[in-house]
């Protein structure tokens, strides 16, 4: 018999294979059994909520999303939490990004209504970003988005400068912005504490689920908090070593449908999911 009451999955590099696909029939069978047993299913990703919903069109109104790395929490179409930077903190971070030495730096600002980029950004990169942000708009100044709640900077730069940039954010903006990396030159700046682990805590409190009863899967630095705090935490075989060290167990590679393999083991009551 399992003790799992919530299953939370990161998306890219974890639930999805490298072609950004998943075995829908196999997942649907798992989901129906989880639903029958009252096990909650959560998608916990750094991606935009509107994009995440598109991967689960038939059940998006039944499940929960910890989107934007924890900045926006939606449970069955109901907003549970939405963080936001102050305008002063946004201006301060922009000043650092514009004046620091970060070759090839590109970024967008993410908010509840849309993601935004300043005019003149590399169009080739924007084509890629539109896969992750189904709502993406051009702006000339922040005054155009004064009514939106902005809760994340999504950055991309040379891998060689990721660590220096993250160190600068820690040094210059400690307490107002936190940097987390998901690899491949991608860095997100979030409101401190508004990470995926915080999102799972909020959902757990709502549903009466303890951390020890949560099964999570991840492969990146933005998954560390939820891996560290959850009772059944699985790093993917394709994850870097620091992520594996944060997890209690290891799941097969994302290209081997590792998440679904483990969920099936959990539903079958196989180790480590036994009382």
Image (cartoon, helix red, strand yellow):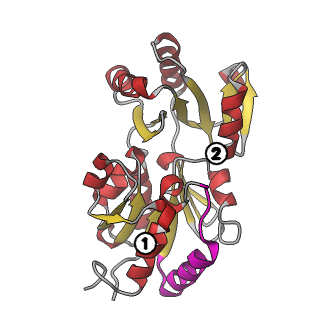
Q: Circle 1 — which element?
A: strand
Residue marked by disc 1: 6
Q: Which quarter shows the N terminus?
A: bottom left
Instruction: Tell me which residue sits at (71%, 36%) in the image.
Output: 127
Circle number at residue 132: 2
Numbered label tally: 2
Q: Is residue 142 magenta?
A: no
> In this picture, which residue range is highlighted in magenta?
19-39
Q: Return the x and y of residue 71 as percentages of the image width and height.
A: 51, 46
Nearest-to-viewer mark from 2 and 1: 2
| Image: 190 above or below 35 | above
Distance Cα–Cα, label 2 vs label 1: 25 Å
Q: Is residue 225 visible?
A: yes
Q: Return the x and y of residue 223 as percentages of the image width and height.
A: 39, 51
Instruction: Tell me which residue sits at (36%, 21%) in the image.
Output: 168
Using residue 37 as the reference point, say whether residue 251 is left or right of it. Answer: left
Using residue 41 as the reference point, say whether residue 112 is left or right of it. Answer: right
Q: Is residue 145 visible?
A: no
Give the mark nearest the N terminus, 2 or 1.
1
* Residue 80 quadrant: bottom right
Q: Is residue 25 magenta?
A: yes
Who is closer to the viewer here, 134 or 157?
A: 157
Q: Return the x and y of residue 192 as percentages of the image width and height.
A: 39, 38
Q: Main secondary structure of the magenta part?
A: helix
Q: Which quarter shows the C terminus?
A: bottom left
* Residue 57 quadrant: bottom right
């Amino acid at each position: 018999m399992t003790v799992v009451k919530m299953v939370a999955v990161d998306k890219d590099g974890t639930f999805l294979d490298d072609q950004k696909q998943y075995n829908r029939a196999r997942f649907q069978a798992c989901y129906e059994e989880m639903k029958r047993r009252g096990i909650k299913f959560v998608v916990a990703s750094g991606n935009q909520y509107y994009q995440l919903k598109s991967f689960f069109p038939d059940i998006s109104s039944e499940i929960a999303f910890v989107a934007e790395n924890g900045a926006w929490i939606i449970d069955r179409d109901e907003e549970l939490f939405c963080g936001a930077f102050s305008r002063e903190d946004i201006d301060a971070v922009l000043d650092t990004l514009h004046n620091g030495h970060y070759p090839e730096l590109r970024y967008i600002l993410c908010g509840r209504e849309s993601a935004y980029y300043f005019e003149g950004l590399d169009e080739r990169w924007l084509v890629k970003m539109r896969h992750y942000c189904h709502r993406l708009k051009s702006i000339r100044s922040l005054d155009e988005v004064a009514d939106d709640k902005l809760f994340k900077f999504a950055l991309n730069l040379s891998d060689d400068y990721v660590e220096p940039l993250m160190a600068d954010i820690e040094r210059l903006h400690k307490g107002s912005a936190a940097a987390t990396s998901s690899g491949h030159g991608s860095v997100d700046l979030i409101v401190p504490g508004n990470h995926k682990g915080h999102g799972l805590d909020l959902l757990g409190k709502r549903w009466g689920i303890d951390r020890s009863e949560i099964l999570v899967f991840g492969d990146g630095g933005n998954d560390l908090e939820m891996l560290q705090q959850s009772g059944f935490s699985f790093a993917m075989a394709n994850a870097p070593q620091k992520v594996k060290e944060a997890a209690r167990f290891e799941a097969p590679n994302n290209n081997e449908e590792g998440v679904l393999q483990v969920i099936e083991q959990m539903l079958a009551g196989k180790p480590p999911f036994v009382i």
